[in-house]
Image (spheres, helix red, strand yellow):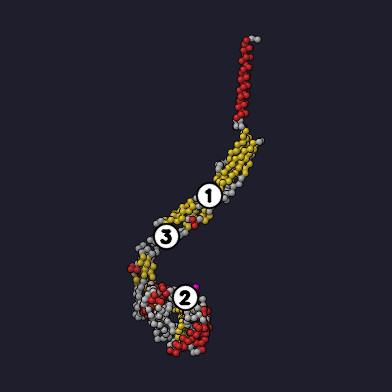
């Protein structure tokens, strides 16, 4: 053995020992620090969001098994997914992913949040030709609001009106807000309205009567523009004829209005009594209708070929057609009132004539002609008008006369307005009154109301009695006997 060989042997042994120690150390470290684990990684975001009502797409997860100190050696594992998401209900839903390998188990939870992040929608209704008249308040044209989650939210819209705009704001139950602004369009496209407060667009005046050229013009922006009205034409009540007047006016924004009025100047009817009128004449008159009993009344009158007079109102406009029927059957259709509202019509002369003209227009529409015959609500002797305007009955009666209008009170009261509700009593009151008039040498003008069934029911017996006792029935005409009660106001 040489020295050299010995030396080498000596050096090799510790080296091997050191190596063995290192390997053992490393293996120890490896076994101490290396871990066996399952890793689950969700696809997409966690938590993930889905909009209310929209489809939920489960994105899934991937899982693998590995040892932590040799991460490049992965084994993919099958993932089990558990959990349901109800997109029709707001809230948080857990979705659980799990994977297993030998005796290892791992789970991961994903939070799925069903939320409502869509704002409601506000829709404005707008009239394409709509505008707000200058100086007037904007009138809401309409709006609606709906939400994908809350449904109709129209009631929840908060509207704030400014001078030139309207702002609409609404919030849904999840706090999403919508806001819409409407710009208000101001304009003036309408000319003034020309009206005839105490007359009509087509009216009759009697020769020798006083005809008043009254008119009024009001503009929706400028107000009263009566002073700017130009009138072309004139009326000569001294000469019979048809007179045409043209009223025109232009407002500040150049809108022009024009209206033509026709005045028929005709001879005044004779007041010497109607043909064949005598103390055996009965004028049946019916006030306050037409109403539900009027057609039945017309049938009764037709059965006996009896003509009567209707002082009409527009209290029951659905029966207005009865005026046309009555006129066709030869009855007289005259004015009582439009409203029969004492407090209104007797408050002023202009109220009275406006109400009168309105009813006369209804009569003209139904019968084809205007009338100059009327009966005051309550009669000319009513005292209730004094509560509203002292002395008005005297002034209205004088004005009626100046205009050539004839009013009729009555000299036979049936009592059906309050005295009785009994058909036989109505009958007795009427025939008693007729006999008294006949004995006094005057025709009978009988007051009944065709709005009372018990009064209408007495008519047939009254007619039978009259015909059996030598009376004859007639409809009032402008020249008929017109009993006038004493005006007391
Ligand atoms: Zn009446």
At which x and y percent is residue 313?
Answer: 45, 75
Image quarter (top left, top right, bottom left or bottom right) of the N terminus: top right
Between disc 3 and disc 1, whose residue precedes?
A: 1
Q: Quadrant of ligand 1?
A: bottom left
Image quarter (top left, top right, bottom left or bottom right) of the C terminus: bottom left
Please tell me whether residue 151 is drawn above or below residue 444 in the rendered image.
Answer: above
Q: Secondary structure at mark 2?
A: helix
Give the residue number, with chain letter if any, for mark 1. 116
Taking the view exactly as shown, the residue that stands out farthest to the right is: 102
Give the residue number, with chain letter if any, for mark 2. 366
Q: Is residue 374 visible?
A: no
Q: Is residue 174 visible?
A: yes
- Foreground pick, 192 / 393: 393
Q: Nearer the viewer, mark 3 or mark 1?
A: 1
At which x and y percent is residue 273?
Answer: 41, 86
- Label 3 near ligand 1 (CB < 8 Å): no
Dot 1 surroundings within 10 Å: few (below 14), some, or many (20 or more)?
many
Between disc 2 and disc 1, whose residue precedes?
A: 1
The disc placed on residue 138 is 3
Dot 2 surroundings within 10 Å: few (below 14), some, or many (20 or more)?
some
Q: Give the left or right position of residue 175, taking residue 85 as reference.
A: left
Please tell me whether residue 123 is drawn above or below residue 95 in the rendered image.
Answer: below
- Foreground pick, 444 / 383: 383
Q: Which residues are magenta?
A: 313-321
Membership of 314 in magenta stretch: yes
Membership of 293 in magenta stretch: no
**CA distance separating discs 3 and 1:** 35 Å
At which x and y percent is residue 471?
Answer: 48, 88
């Amino acid at each position: 053995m040489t020295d050299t060989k010995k030396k080498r042997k000596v050096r090799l042994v510790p080296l091997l020992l050191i190596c063995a120690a290192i390997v053992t150390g490393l293996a120890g470290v490896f076994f101490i620090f290396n871990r066996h684990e399952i890793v689950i990684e969700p696809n997409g975001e966690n938590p993930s969001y889905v909009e209310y009502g929209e489809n939920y797409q489960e994105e899934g997860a991937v899982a693998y098994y590995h040892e932590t100190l040799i991460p490049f050696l992965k084994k993919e594992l099958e993932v089990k997914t558990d959990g349901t998401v109800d997109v029709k209900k707001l809230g948080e839903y857990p979705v659980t992913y799990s994977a297993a390998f030998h005796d290892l188990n791992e789970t991961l939870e994903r939070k799925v949040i069903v939320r409502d992040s869509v704002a409601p929608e506000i829709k404005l209704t707008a009239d394409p030709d709509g505008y707000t008249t200058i100086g007037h308040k904007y009138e809401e044209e309409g709006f609606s609001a709906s939400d994908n989650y809350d449904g109709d939210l129209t009631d929840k819209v908060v509207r704030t009106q400014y001078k030139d705009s309207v702002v609409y704001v609404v919030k849904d139950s999840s706090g999403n807000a919508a806001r819409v602004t409407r710009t208000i369009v101001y304009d003036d496209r309408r000319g003034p309205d020309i009206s005839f407060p105490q007359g009509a667009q087509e009216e009759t005046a009697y020769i020798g009567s006083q005809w008043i050229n009254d008119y009024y013009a009001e503009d929706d922006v400028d107000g009263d523009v009566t002073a700017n009205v130009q009138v072309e034409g004139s009326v000569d009540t001294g000469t019979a004829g048809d007179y045409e007047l043209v009223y025109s006016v232009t407002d500040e924004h150049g809108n022009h209005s024009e209206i033509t009025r026709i005045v028929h100047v005709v001879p005044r009817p004779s007041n010497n009594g109607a043909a064949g009128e005598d103390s055996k004449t009965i004028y049946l008159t019916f006030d306050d209708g037409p109403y539900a009993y009027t057609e039945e009344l017309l049938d009764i009158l037709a059965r006996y070929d009896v003509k009567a007079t209707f002082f009409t109102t527009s209290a029951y406009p659905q029966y207005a057609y009865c005026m046309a029927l009555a006129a066709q059957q030869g009855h007289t259709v005259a004015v009582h009132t439009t409203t029969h509202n004492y407090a209104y019509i007797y408050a002023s002369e202009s109220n009275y004539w406006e109400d009168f003209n309105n009813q006369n227009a209804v009569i003209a529409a139904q019968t084809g002609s205007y009338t100059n015959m009327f009966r005051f609500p309550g009669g000319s002797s009513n005292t209730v008008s004094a509560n509203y305007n002292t002395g008005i009955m005297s002034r209205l009666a004088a004005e009626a006369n100046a205009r050539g209008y004839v009013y009729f009170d009555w000299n036979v009261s049936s009592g059906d307005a309050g005295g009785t509700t009994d058909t036989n009593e109505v009958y007795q009151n009427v025939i008693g009154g007729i006999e008294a008039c006949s004995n006094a040498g005057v025709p009978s003008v009988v007051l009944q109301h065709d709005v009372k069934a018990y009064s209408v029911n007495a008519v047939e017996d009254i007619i039978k009695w009259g015909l059996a006792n030598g009376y004859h029935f007639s409809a009032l005409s402008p020249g008929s006997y017109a009993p006038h009660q004493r005006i007391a106001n």
